[in-house]
Image (cartoon, grey):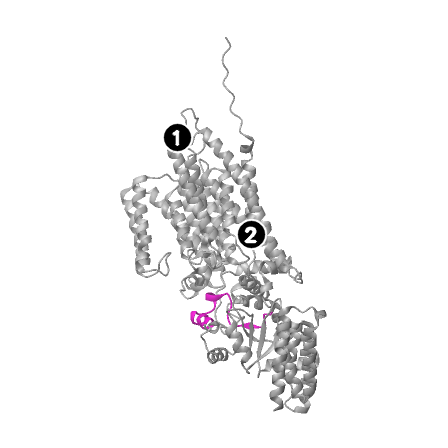
Amino acid sequence: MKPISPDPPARPHKIQTMLAPAAFAFLLVATAYGVLEAHSSTDTWIGLAGGRQIAEQISWSNIRETFPLTDTFSYTFEGQPWFNQNWMTHLSQWYLYEHISPNAVIYGTWLLGGLTFMLVAMAAYWKSGSATGALVTASIMAIGCRNFLTARPATTSFFCMAALWALLCTIEGQDRKTRWWPIAILLPLLVVWGHAHGSFLLAYAVLVMYVSHWTVIHYSAHKVNSLATLLIPLGILATIAVSGKPLLFLDHPRVLRWLPVLGYAGFWFAVRVVKPRLSAHPRQIAGVILVSLLGLILTVLTSPFGLGHLTHGDKVAGSPVYRNVTEWHPPFTHITTAFPSMAPFWVILGGTSLLLIGCVLLKTFNSPEPTDEPSGNRVLSISFFDWAMLLFGACMVFWARRFAPMFYIFAGPTICALIVMLLGSASASMRQRLKGTLATALLVAAAITGWATVQAARGQLVDKFEGGKERFNLLERVTRCDLIPDEAIRYLRDNDIKARLFLEWTQAGRVMFLAPDIDVFIDGRSQQVYSEQHYLTYLKIWDATTSADQIRAILDDARTDAVLLRPGRRSKHLLACMTSSPEWLWVLQGPRESPFGLFLRHDSELVRTLSKRIRDGHEVRSESPEALATLGLTIAATAPRSRDAASADIAWAVRCWRSAIEQAPHLAGWCQNVTKGYLDLGQPEQARQYLASLVERARDNKNNLISADRDKLLEQVQICQRIIASRGR
C-alpha cells in the first residue's frame, strides 16, 4: 500500500498575487493626487524673494555679519527684525529657480512630497513588518495631504518630521542587529531642519520624549531609580504648567496645561504594570542624546540669529490674533469652506476608525485554526511612546488644521501596526480571503484616485489657463498667478514707480519677488515681522463698517502712496472709497478677465513722475481697452491748469476713452468722461454726435453686442444726455 502523500499547499488566487502591485499602483496615483494641487500661495513668492536677497548678500565665510536680519520689503516695519527661520528653504527654492528653471521649484516640491510619503511607508514597515500595509498607509496619507504640501517651508518641515519618525521607527524595528546608521543620519537632519523651518524645536521635544520613555522603562525594575524617573520629569512638567507655558494647548485654560503632568504620571504607572520591552540598546540611547546635543549646538552656532533662534517659535505659534487665519482654525470649524479643506481628514479618520472596529470584531469572532503553523515573523508591539506620539499628532491637528500631515506622519505607522497585529490572529483561509478583497479594493481605489487626479490636474493646471493665459509657466499655474494682478505689479516696476503699496497680504509675496523696490503694507510673513496690532489695523481697512475718513487716516499715517485692489465682496467698500476720493487717482484698470484697480495718491511725486513719462512717451502700459481708458483719466487729471494748455491733453484723453469704448463696449461707463471732455473743450455738438453714434451702434444688429453690453450702453447714453442738458442751463 502506497503511503498517502500530503496535499500540496493551495495556490493563491490570481487576484491575491496582485496585492503588492495594486498597493504600489495605489501609492503612485495617490502621490500624484497629493502633490498635484494648486492654490494662491504667497509663501512661495516670499520664499523666492527672501532666498534671492540672501543669495545676493550673504558671505559664507561670515554668515552672521552678512545675513539680512531686518525687514526691507515693507514700509510699515522696515528695519525691524525679521526672524527668517525658514531661510535655508528659501535659499534652496531660489537656487532651483535661478540655476535650473522656475518650474524646478515645483518639481522639487513634488519630489519632497513623494519622499515624505516614502518615509512614512518606511516607518510603517518597521512598525508593522508589512510592506503592503506600509504602502497603503503612505497612500492614505498622500490623499489626505493634498492642499498641505505646497512650495513653502512647511513642506520641508513635514519632510523632516517624517524622516525623524522613520529613523526612530527603524531603531525600534531592529531585532538582534543594532542599527547605528539612523543615529548617524539624525545629526545632519537636525542641523538642516534647524535652518529650514521654525518647527525644528519639535524634533528635540520628540527626542526628549523618546529618551525619557526609554529611561523610565529601562530603570523601572529599580525602585530608587524608578522613583527618580517619575519625580524629575514631573517636576519639569509642573514647572512648565505653573509658569503658564503649556506644551500643546497654548490658548486654553490653565487646567488643561496640567494634562501633560497627569499624562506622564499615568504613563509611569502603566509602565510599572505592563513592563514593556525595549528595542534600543543603552549605547544607542547615549548616541541619540549625544547627537541631539551636537545638533542643537551646531544649529545655534551656525544660525544668524544665535540663541534667539530657540525662542522665536513662541511668538509664531502663540498669537491668538494671528490664529484668526484659517489655517490655524481647528478642523471641526468650516470643514469644507475654509482653506485647507478638512473633509479628507474626517473621511480618513472615520474610515480608519471603522476599519479598526472591523479588525477587532474579526479577531474576536474568527480564531485561528489549530493546524495553523507559526508565521515566524518577528513579534510586533506598540509601545507607550507610539501611543503618545499618536496622541501628540491628534492634539496638534485639533489645535490647528495646518498640522493634519503631522497626524498622518505620527499616527499612520502605529495604526498600520495595530491593524496587522489584529489581523495576524486570523486563520490562514481568512487571511487569503482578506488579501483578495484588499487587492480588489486597492485596484479600484487606484483607478478612482487616478481618474480624480487627472480631472483635478486638468481643471486646475490646464483648463483655467486656456484662452490667452498660456504665458503662465508651471510655477505660476500652481501658485494661481491668474488671480494676482501681475499687470499692475509689472506696471509699477517697469515705470520705475517705487511705491509704498497697500494690497491684500496674500498677494504681497508676488510683489516682493517681481518688484523688490516696491514696499508693501503687510505680507504673509505675519508674526515673523509684524505686530498683532498692525494685523488688526490691516483687517480694519477691509471692514465695511470702517468709514472713508478712518481708512484715509490709516493710509495717511502709514505714508501709503499706492493702493492695488481686486473687485469683490471683500473689497467693494474700499474700492468705492478709492474711486470716490479726490485724493486718489485711478491710473490703471485690469482687463475684463482679470480686473483690478491701481490707485496712486493724486498729489504725490509718483504721479508727477508718471505724468512726465507719459508725455515723454516712455510709459510702459498694456494695450488693453481698460488700460487705455485709465490712461485717458491719468492724462486728464494731470493736465496743466491753464485752459489753453490743457486743451490738447483733454482732447488726447477723449481719444483714449473713445477708443477704449470702441474696442470694449462693456466700458460704456467711460462715455461720461467723453461727454464731459467735449463739454470742457466747448464742443457740446461733438458730444451729441458721439452719443448718437453710440445709440446707432447699440441698435445695429451687425455689431453682435450681447444684451448686457447693449443695455448698459443705452443707459449710459441717457445719463450723458442729462449731463449735456444740465451744462446747457
Residue under circle 2? 35
Q: Which amino acid does label 2 sit on?
A: Val
Question: Is 644 or 676 nearer to us in this picture?
Answer: 676
The residue that appears at 41% across and 36% down in the rendered structure is 422
Q: Where residue 116 appears, x then y in whole percent? A: 52, 49
Q: Residue at x 49, y 18 (%)?
A: 6
Towards the viewer: 66 or 429: 429
Extent of the magenta region = 515-539
What amino acid is labelled 1 in the image? Ser
* 357 to the left or right of 676: left
Work out whether residue 610 can be spotted: no
Pick the residue in front: 329 or 161.
329
* Label 1 element class: loop
Residue assigned mark 1:
367
Q: Where is residue 314 in the image (x, y as percent from the top left)?
A: 41, 62
Is 34 covered by the magenta stretch?
Answer: no
